[in-house]
Image: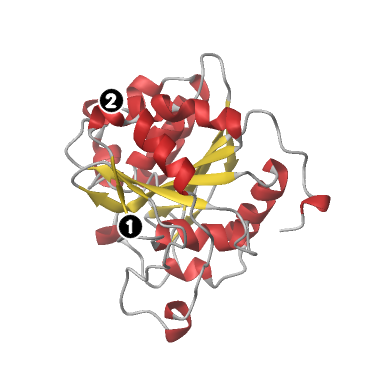
Amino acid sequence: MNTDSQATLKSRLPALFLGHGSPMNALADNVHTQAWRRIAEQIGQPRAVLAISAHWYTEGTWVTGETAPKTIHDFGGFPDALFKIQYPAPGDPVLAAQVVQRLAHTGAQLRTDWGLDHGSWSVLRHMYPEADVPVVQLSIDARRSWPEHLALGAALSELRDHGVLILGSGGIVHNLGRVDWRGVQGPPDWARQFDDWVCARALAGDDFALATPTTFDDAGRLAVPTPDHYLPLLYVLGSRRAGEPARIVHRGFELGSISLTAVQIG
């Protein structure tokens, strides 16, 4: 990535949540991928990326420690061209060790048998197409409560002062059981309603409501049938300091029930 044409890197980097949508967006040039490129240009090139992907939803808090993380094709039934994509970004063992230290109270540990799944590389290949920004990935521990995930984001917040972009990748609305595979209809009312509610709460700084699923109405329960794609948002929200603003930097849906809304802190 040629930084000469990019925005000057801020002293405190934003934190960013992206709805990544279908893996096919990795190959696409559309309004969503164009937005990802534009957001990256506005942020500037970070020293490194700490990615929290919906697709590393497991037991335990794990951090990738590889110097050269592999590109994981964690999907099936897609064209060969998607499986041929490689995103050879370097790892950052020093950053990985810092993340483990900051999350030591969780029992966080390094792993060198994962790499970058498509929740990370499908967006990063548009944001930083030269794959020259080191990337470390953090798992989502399925056993933890939603407020705990918010607190983990807070524990990582200071990394933003040192050139690290905290990137959550998932989807505010992600219901594969309600997908419109023909793609001829817009999002149903419940999907748009919940996406709007989350955006409003994020702008208002009401992170508690967003980390309390018992506050969700029927629309929310349809929008978040499983927590894996929603929880990366909490890490991003958790990383904000008191009074730090949120911005909605992209809105959109695909296949009816998949949101590609993007939320930026700072």
Q: Which picture quadrant has residue 162?
A: top right
| Residue 250 at x, y percent in the picture | 58, 45
Q: Name the kind of residue labelled 1 in the image.
A: Thr
Counting every numbered tag in the picture gives 2
| Residue 227 at x, y percent in the picture | 26, 43
Residue placed most toward the observer, 114 or 29: 114
Q: Which of the marked residues, 1 or 2, is nearer the chain's N terminus?
A: 1
Q: Is residue 9 left or right of residue 205?
A: right
Q: Name the kind of residue labelled 2 in the image.
A: Pro
| Residue 206 at x, y percent in the picture | 42, 20
Other-residue count near label 2 (Cα within 10 Å), few / some / many at <14 / 14–19 / ≥20: some
- Per the rendering, the mark at residue 147 is 2
**Cβ–Cβ under 8 Å for marks 1 and 2:** no
In this orientation, does residue 193 appear? no
Which image quarter is the C terminus in? Answer: top right
Which image quarter is the N terminus in? Answer: bottom right
* Residue at the extreme top: 242
Residue placed most toward the observer, 256 or 250: 250
- Per the rendering, the mark at residue 165 is none
The residue depicted at 38 percent of the width and 61 percent of the height is: 117
User: What residue is pinned by disc 1?
Assistant: 112
In space, the residues marked 1 and 2 are separated at their CA atoms by: 28 Å
Q: Is residue 182 left or right of residue 31?
A: left
In this orientation, does residue 207 appear? yes
The residue depicted at 41 percent of the width and 63 percent of the height is: 118
* Residue at the extreme right: 4
Q: Secondary structure at mark 2?
A: helix
The residue depicted at 37 percent of the width and 68 percent of the height is: 72
The residue depicted at 24 percent of the width and 31 percent of the height is: 106
Q: Secondary structure at mark 1?
A: loop
Other-residue count near label 1 (Cα within 10 Å), few / some / many at <14 / 14–19 / ≥20: some
